[in-house]
Image: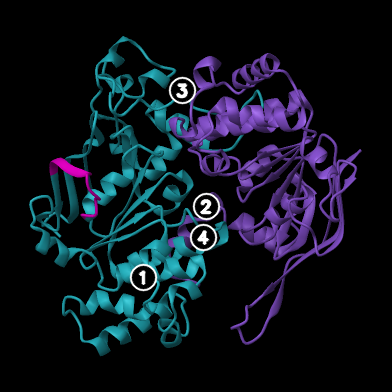
Chain colours: A cyan, B purple
Amino acid sequence: MSADGTVLAVEGLRVEYPSGDGSLVAVDGIDFEVAAGERVGIVGESGSGKSSAAFAIAGLLSPPGRISAGHIRFEDVDLVTLDEAERERMRGVRLSMVYQDPFTFLNPVLRVGDQVAEVLTAHGRASAREARARTEELFEQLGLTPGRQFARKYPHQLSGGQRQRVVIAMAVIARPGLLIADEPTTALDVTVQAQILTLLSRTVRRLGSSLLLISHDLSVIRLMCERVYVMYAGLFVESGRTERIFRAPRHPYTQALLRASSRVLDEQRRFPTIPGVPPDRRYPPTGCRFAERCAYRFERCAEAPPLLSVAEGGRAACWLEAPR
Amino acid sequence: MTVLELDRVTKAYVSGGLLERSRSTILALDAVSLAMDAGETLGLVGESGSGKSTIARIATGLLRPTAGSVVTLGQRVDGRPERGLRTLRGRLGFVFQDPYASLNPRHRLGETLSLPFRVHRPLDRDARRAEIIRLLERVGLTPAAAFIDKLPHQLSGGQRQRVAIARAIALRPELLIADEPVSSLDVSVAGQILNLLRDVQREIGSSVLLISHDLGLVRAMCDRVVVIHRGRIVETGATEAVFSAPSHAVTRQLLDSMPERLAARDLHEETGT
């Protein structure tokens, strides 16, 4: 953690996927920070770049994806310029990640207790015996009881919810400063989702870790996060306190997204929608990226809007917020 | 008129192979009885593995029940596979969760959409093409002439689901079965697909059986709802009544688990772990 209590500070982050006919810029320059113990969300639809941002921060981008610009300062170390060996030492220990699909993440031929304990033994952070004891204790705290017997199970013997608990155990066993969770409950039933979200929230709180939650689901973000960044076509379009964004969203995209996800029919008994589709990311418009779908579009939208200050410390990338 | 009637339908699977110590019977459905009226939109809700998709497969003759009777659009479908099932399928339409898996990746859209006609309603080439153009236009894939030669991988998820709807309504089905029709789509696209589904349902006058774990969607779409848990119906009633005053613990738990209804305070505090 730095002197001002910031755990993660991202500046001008760009993530690109080079391809035959030009490069696809998945994340096109985003800035944000996460304070110690804070729970922050990034919400967006598929293709918005939210998962690319998360994977870039976790150092898990798969080639040809690469960070083409920007800095990721984590506990005062710039992860972008860090060499691979240093980053490897940090990964899973100070900074860890939980993914959407726990089954592909777990090794099917190893006992789950050994997989979790290995996080501690791999870098000599604990003896095998100590690691085993801490794993069993953590399993108990996560409701995987009795811990000792549970540790001997294999992934295929577990339900979806149990697997996700094991993945959470693996992510938090070393008491990370930051836990990144990318759609951690999307594949789960609603009752199991409620249990996992509760567990995740209480666990990061008990450990004093910060949480960066990535989700397409506004209701999950609302429940879990104190602050939220709304992402559209590779950029943040709005940020602020979660409560304010849900009560008084400023950006037209945030407003439309909130209406569309409510599943509440409008006066014509229609499901609210956002007309049109997001822009082709290989050829993004030079102006506001949401303009083509926006009901409030005017001349100035041909120019890309910066993030402008709005009420209650929030920001929105919309010319409607510019002083007139 | 009743479009679908299940009477004490049971579906059993025997689990455990030669190497297992004991073989046991698992009841995917346990004496399920339900009836669906013409024009009705009925929601089937339950968690994964509850049996809701099994009901749909049995109702359409894709799966034979172990016991009980099934009458779909006036036809018995619980017996041995018969030729009659083919006629019945021409009166049913299906929309599944993953349009990519349900569309043949090597078939151009024109080919995918011509299949229902070739199987169930003989038309000459020109008439068939005219029908396909009309369908593409109806589901908003315009200009239709530009879409007719496309392959599924050239479409977005929402466009693929539009193709799936076009195929489902090609023969103006009396019963439309939608199994998680928007759960793989983004919210901004999901609304467009749901409006389309409601519009075509109204035009054709189909009854709709909607299978979903999304309670908000079921509340907005369905007249009546059936809650399934471990192969049994635990609650059934008018949608608003069930949502505002659920009588079974399983229904209450499902509703209380919706993120919209969970309270942030309970989530973050250590009490009651």
Disc with the residue nearer the chain's start (4 vs 3): 4
Task: Please state which of residues A105 and B113 is positioned toward the viewer in this rendering.
Answer: B113
Pointer 2 residue: B259
Spatial distance from mark 4 to mark 3, Cα to Cα? 33 Å
The label number, if any, that marks residue A194 in the structure image: 4
Judged by depth in the image, the label closer to the viewer, 4 or 1, is: 1
Instruction: Give the residue at the far front of this rendering.
Output: B124
- Which residue is depicted at the point 72% across and 58% down? B228
Pointer 3 residue: A276
| Residue type at numbered disc 3 | Gly
Judged by depth in the image, the label closer to the viewer, 3 or 2, is: 3
The answer to whether residue A257 is left or right of residue B237 is left
Spatial distance from mark 1 to mark 3, Cα to Cα? 42 Å
Looking at the image, can residue A323 be seen? yes
Residue A265 placement (x, y as % from top left): 62, 31
Instruction: Give the chain of mark 4.
Output: A
Residue A264 placement (x, y as % from top left): 60, 35
The answer to whether residue A132 is left or right of residue A263 is left
| Neighbourhood count class around disc 3 (C-alpha, 10 Å): few under 14, some 14–19, many 20 upward | few
Task: Please state which of residues B218 and B200 is positioned toward the viewer in this rendering.
Answer: B200
| Neighbourhood count class around disc 2 (C-alpha, 10 Å): few under 14, some 14–19, many 20 upward | many
Pointer 1 residue: A107
| Neighbourhood count class around disc 1 (C-alpha, 10 Å): few under 14, some 14–19, many 20 upward | few
| Neighbourhood count class around disc 4 (C-alpha, 10 Å): few under 14, some 14–19, many 20 upward | many
Looking at the image, can residue A270 be seen? no
Which region shows up in magenta? A59-70
- Which residue is depicted at the point 14% across and 58% down? A75
Spatial distance from mark 2 to mark 4, Cα to Cα? 7 Å
- Which image quarter is the N terminus of chain A in? bottom left
Residue A163 placement (x, y as % from top left): 44, 69
| Residue type at numbered disc 2 | Pro
